[in-house]
Each structure stands twice: as C-alpha cells, then as structure tokens.
Amino acid sequence: KQEVTQIPAALSVPEGENLVLNCSFTDSAIYNLQWFRQDPGKGLTSLLLIQSSQREQTSGRLNASLDKSSGRSTLYIAASQPGDSATYLCAVLNSGYSTLTFGKGTMLLVSP
Amino acid sequence: GAGVSQSPSNKVTEKGKDVELRCDPISGHTALYWYRQSLGQGLEFLIYFQGNSAPDKSGLPSDRFSAERTGGSVSTLTIQRTQQEDSAVYLCASSLPRGQGDNSPLHFGNGTRLTVT
C-alpha cells in the first residue's frame, strides 16, 4: 500500500526567502506525482504534475522535482510571498490504484 | 461550468439524519472522485467513477455511505443515519478519462463542510 509523507508539517518563513517542501513515497511504481495548494475553506488547486518519466516541472516561481528510484519529490518556491501562505499537498498516482494517495500536507506561512 | 461545483457548501445535520451532497464535474471529465478531509487528517479516498464502468467503492468507510452518478455527469454522495464522526469536508474532483487522464491533473471543487450535531 502506497504511503506518502510530507516534511515539514508546518513552516514559517519571512517574505523573500526561497524554500523547499519535501514529499516521500514508499512505492516507486507511480504514473505521476502532483503538487496541490489548499487555501483555508477551499478545495485543492493543482500546481504541478510530474509524469513518471520526467525529472522536474516548473511554473513561475515553483519548481517540482521527482526522483522515482528514491521515492522523493521536492517543491521549491523561490522568493516567497505572503500570498504563498497555504497548505501544500503532495499526491501520487500508482499503477493498480484507481486514484491518488495524498500526504497530510505542509502548512506554509510567509510573513511580510 | 468552468470548474467543479459542489453543493451545499455547508451542511449542519442532526445525528441519525440522512444527507445528500452534490457534485457537478467539469464538462467532458468522465472521471469523478469523492474524498473526505477530516481536521488534521489527509485526504481519504471514498469512491471513484470512470465513465460507464462499475465504480471503485473501496474507500467507503461503511454501508451507510453510497454514491451514484447519473448520466455520467452529476454525482450524489449519500450518508445515511449520520454519526458525529462523519463530520468532515467532503471534496469532489474530476479529470479526463483515465486512459488519457493518467497525466491529467485532478480538478477539485470547494467541498461541502458537513457538521453532525
């Protein structure tokens, strides 16, 4: 059974800092990995999707990497802003499963 | 519509009552998912619909929970004889068909916050 772990559970940084969120998974036989953002009281917004054959994806100030063999992904946020404050979730799609397995998320607070 | 729509956004009900939660997916998305998010917990998979195939119900926590999807579009999640532990945010998501959708992101609605008193 796939298990997804996110570290740290919470992170507080001053505006402007670059930061890294970590995700690890136990079963490396994945189709893809997705990073989501969740604002309080809202649903999830997809940020980046990395296919199993890819090493990284970039969107604006966000860069996600994938190392399938070691079961790890990182989400890099450059020049953080207060608007980046949210919970960030990592999820993987495995062969043999119908749907994504989610981590519990990292709650990020960026202070002005 | 432009996104996944869920209703109601909030529902307060008394223990023992039945509730119905509705999800209207993005047009053209034949894959539809229900998840539950409890305070301090990760997202818990409930049920998955793909086109006309039999749904994957492996995540439903008890037989009090059921879901249907009419006409391959709108879905309703029903919880019978609600219990306090059913209190959570129920999230619906949709995506392109699985054959095409393995590398297509899930699009989530804003969820229904269910409170059982």
Image (cartoon, grey):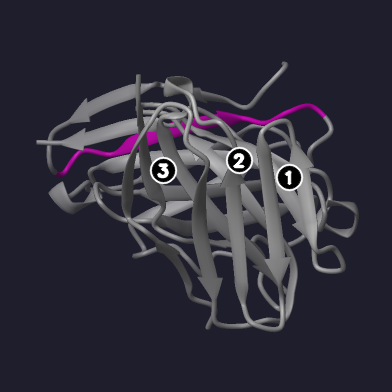
- B22 part of magenta stretch: yes
Give the numbered dot on residue B105. Answer: 1
Task: Please tell me whether mark 3 or mark 2 is closer to you in this view.
Answer: 2
Label 1 or label 3, whichever lies nearer to me, is 1
At which x and y percent is residue B85?
Answer: 18, 53
Q: Are marks 3 and 2 in contact (CB under 8 Å)?
A: no
**Mark 1 belongs to which subunit?**
B
| Secondary element type, mark 1 | loop
Q: Residue A99, position in %: x, y? A: 63, 61
- The secondary element bearing badge 2 is classed as strand
Residue drawn at x 28%, y 26% as measured from the top left? B11
Q: Which residues are magenta?
A: B16-27
Left or right? Give the position of B34 relative to B78: right
Q: What's the amino acid at mark 1?
A: Pro
Q: Quadrant of residue A79?
A: top right
Residue A61 % position (x, y)? 66, 33
- Find disc 2 in the rendering and name its residue: B93
Residue B68 sits above or below residue A42 on the image: below
Q: Write down the residue under mark 3.
A: B78
10 Å crowding of disc 1: few (<14), some (14-19), many (20+): many
Residue ranking furthest to the left: B117
Q: Position of residue B99 (x, y in %)?
A: 89, 59
Residue visible at 82% across and 54% down in the picture? B103
Q: Quadrant of the C terminus of chain A?
A: top left
Task: Name the chain under label 3.
Answer: B
